Image (cartoon, helix red, strand yellow):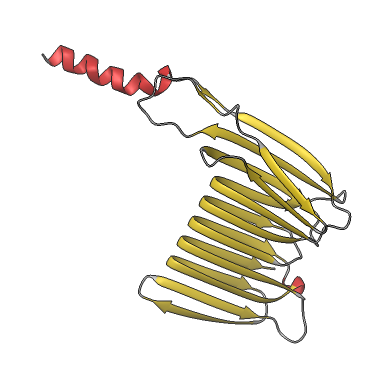
Amino acid sequence: MIARTLVALSLLVCLPALAETKCKLMEQSFDAEGLGHLSIDVHVGELKVQPSEDGQVHVSVQACPRNGWFSFRKRTAEAAELKVERAQEHMSFTLNKDKYSETWTVRMPPSVALAADVGVGEADINGLASDIDVDMGVGDVQIEGRVADYHRVSGDVGVGEINVDAVSGTGESHRAVVADSETWVADGGEGKATIETDVGVGDADIKLN
């Protein structure tokens, strides 16, 4: 009886290996001439945004299936497609279906405004000098930029914490049980851009050097 139980348990542990997992990598580059605003919609996964140096937008996204543990079927993301829309100065990226684990890396001109909507996961944005608006359902947000480029930062976290660390300017925070909010305003007339973050559950960390 004990032997049969051990065999059954070992089979359960091996089940994920029996279902083959196949991811799909999609990479494209776009001319950013006339582009003023870029929006990215991530269902579940990680988003990393960095500045580009060639005046183009480069996007790389890997989609992997999010099937359950007890599936003997071949798990594949071959049906995943990168949806790109461009209307005058606005461009948007998303995947065609909300059924994958997504890993995004986007390099874009630092002067282009960014709006990122992440359902569950992480967002890491570094080196932009433009308006940044991040809406995170569940997860963590990290933003880093130059204090000279921004004049206002505001953020709200439903459950978790937010921290704005700037080398100058004035900050004000409000903590209420599990919720947290913080605003920061630059000294004098420094900066033109703004940063806004809204996190349902998680943490937000904004650093201006």
Residue 36 coordinates in the image, percent (x, y): 80, 61
Residue 5 coordinates in the image, percent (x, y): 17, 17
Left or right, 94 with reference to 68: right
Left or right, 119 with reference to 125: left
Left or right, 68 with reference to 63: left
Q: Residue at x 68, y 64 (%)?
A: 132
Q: Residue at x 59, y 53 (%)?
A: 123
Q: How many marks?
A: 0
Left or right, 15 with reference to 61: left
Q: Nearer the viewer, residue 119 or 193?
A: 119
Q: Residue at x 23, y 17 (%)?
A: 8
Q: Residue at x 70, y 39 (%)?
A: 60
In the rendered image, the vertical position of residue 83 relative to residue 132, given as above or below: above
Residue 204 coordinates in the image, percent (x, y): 53, 63
Residue 147 coordinates in the image, percent (x, y): 72, 72
In which quadrant is the C terminus drawn?
bottom right
Query: Residue 134 falls in which quadrant of the image?
Result: bottom right
